[in-house]
Image (cartoon, helix red, strand yellow):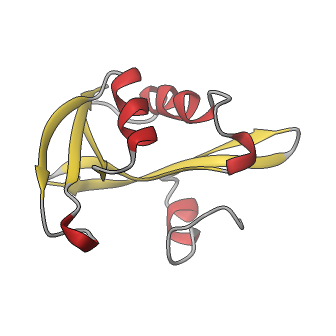
Amino acid sequence: MAFDSFPGDRIAEIVERRMLVAEVDGVIAGYIAWQTGGCIGKDYVNKLVVDPDYRRHGIAQSLIAELKSILNGRVFISTGAHNSAAVRLLALTNWQLAGQIVGLRPAEEPEIFYYRDL
């Protein structure tokens, strides 16, 4: 997927069924993936990616909403503090601020963590 900026491939997530994919007219428009127990023993959404051609069409919101059918309990997600689109999306989809860590990202950009009970 040319629009996927995360390193590596997605084989493990696919094989382990830790990914939901959004398609539009047979084209992959985005996906969400998670690590089971990946954040202090809680599920952690580690990838949420939407093709730039399909952004602002509700795809990320739909992928987040669909998590309820797969995961339950407290789930975590994070983003860089400078990613204003992601910060807005997480507020819009009812994620609660959990805190931040400085030193995980380049240039000391804080990594902001959120949680949501599914």
Spot occupied by residue 21 in the image (x, y as percentages of width and height): 64, 46
Furthest residue to the bottom?
8
Q: Which of 106 and 75 is in front in this view?
A: 106
Residue at 52%, 78% in the rendered image: 8
Rendered-image quadrant of the C terminus: top left
Residue at 87%, 44% in the rendered image: 26
Q: Is residue 37 among the parts visible in the rendering?
A: yes
Residue at 39%, 41% in the rendered image: 84
User: Eyeballing the image, is 66 above or below 42?
Assistant: above
Q: Nearer the viewer, residue 17 or 118?
A: 118
User: Eyeballing the image, is 50 above or below 64?
Assistant: below
Q: Judge from the rendering whether residue 82 lies leftward or rightward of residue 117; answer left or right.
A: right
Spot occupied by residue 114 in the image (x, y as percentages of width and height): 23, 38
Furthest residue to the right?
25
Q: Which of 118 and 79 is in front in this view?
A: 79
Spot occupied by residue 93 in the image (x, y as percentages of width and height): 40, 23
Q: Judge from the rendering whether residue 5 lies leftward or rightward of residue 23; answer left or right.
A: left
Q: Judge from the rendering whether residue 49 lies leftward or rightward of residue 75; answer left or right.
A: right
Q: Which of 56 and 13 is in front in this view?
A: 56
User: Eyeballing the image, is 56 above or below 10?
Assistant: above
